[in-house]
Image: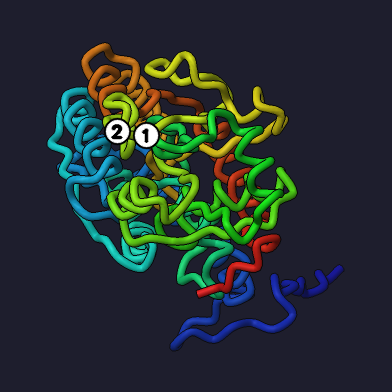
Amino acid sequence: MSKKPTTTQPLSPTPVQLGRTTVPGLRQRLRWLAPILAACGMLASTAALAQAPFPSKPLRIVVGFGAGGVADIAARIVAQGLGQELGKPVVVENLPGAGGINAAVAVAKAEPDGHTLLLVSNQNAVSSSLFKTLPYRPLEDFAMISPIGSFDLVMVVDKASKLKTVGEAIAQARKDPAGFNIGTVGIGSTQNLAAQLFIAMAGLDAQVVPFRSSGDVVSALRGGNVQAGFETMPAVLPQIQSGALRPLAVTGSKRFASLPGTPTMSETGLTNYQATSWNGLAAPAKTPVAVVTRLNQALAKVVQSPASAKKLADLGLEPRSSTPQAFQALVAGEIRKWHEVIERAHIEKQ
């Protein structure tokens, strides 16, 4: 019996011609493999970045304020401590202007490797509502690391003022709205918004008068041009201690250690009133979690060390640290809070 010829079935309905060699189905297979190979490459790059030694070079902290201010000095205290903890120099770079926008943009666009950090403050939280548009996203473009510290504001009057309590100040403002002015530094500052929050919660129709500097606010108080003022504790504590200014209340959740006899706003009857200035560190978004964790741990050690804590306290800051997640939640809450104050006060967006 003769054998039937055998036939070979092709692996692919349509063979693929490559040069002079026919390789059935290769093009289809390459199409399937391409995204898999690309994903493997991305994973390898991410893994290499995450496993790279950190830090591998000097770090820099970008500060959106000029040299010599509280934020700048706090950043330099932290930079010194971080340098010791991380074993690499940490320098402070000042990029003032545009309400901290210049500094924020510089860090948002930096390589997300943890070597470029931003000194964030409540001004960053305010900016999202104070400006019509921002060239960065306050939350999405950064990986929050930890707070550094916070400091209260204080409501003050001149030593010659007849006002001794917040209740008396509220009563006077209601009796003579046109004659009761509150002095603060520029529109949109924490001090300015703290005064606006006070007016809203007390149900007043008082006028908030912005000045260029803290010194101008003090001069206006001493000259009787404004009847009360809201200022940061470091800016007016010397005048309070000398007796030139009288504190009526602090704006934090607890009394200030150096002014134990001065109540909080909540204690005076404005329940849940709180307005503090704070700062911390953030890295560009997409910084590896391991790097953020390393920075968080190092910063916590610095803030909690007796030497650094004393230096920060001498500035009027209460040293504090937290997890990155808690700090992220704090910033998000501050953005919502000050957005409401700005909208209620009808502050024109810049």
Residue lying at the far left of the rendered structure: 89
At label 2, the amino acid type is: Gln
In-image side of 290 versus 96 (left or right): right
Q: Report crowding for label 2: few under 14, some 14 to 19, many 20 or more residues within 10 A (C-alpha).
A: some
Q: Are the two marked residues, 2 and 1, in contact with CB atoms closer than 8 angstroms?
A: yes
Please provide percent x and percent y for residue 249: 53, 29
Residue nearer the viewer, 122 or 83: 122
Q: Is residue 187 or residue 175 the one in the foreground?
A: 175
Residue 6 versus residue 93 in the image, above or below: below
The number of numbered discs placed on residues in the rendered structure image is: 2
Could you tell me which secondary element the residue under label 2 belongs to? helix
Real-space CA distance between mark 2 and mark 1, rounded to the nearest whole angstrom? 6 Å
The residue singled out by tag 1 in the image is 245
Query: Foreground: 113 or 157?
Result: 157
Q: Position of residue 32 (x, y in %)?
A: 63, 66
Image side of residue 281 versus residue 263, left or right: left
Q: 258 left or right of 197?
A: left
The colour scheme applied to this rendered structure is rainbow
Q: Is residue 228 above or below residue 18?
A: above
**Which residue: 44% across, 61% down?**
210
Is residue 85 visible from the viewing direction of this image? yes
**Which residue has dot 2 on it?**
239
For the point 31% across and 55% down, which residue is it? 216
Instruction: Give the residue drawn at x 39%, y 47%.
Output: 221
Classed neighbour count for the residue bearing mark 1: other residues with Cα under 10 Å, few (<14), some (14–19), many (≥20): many
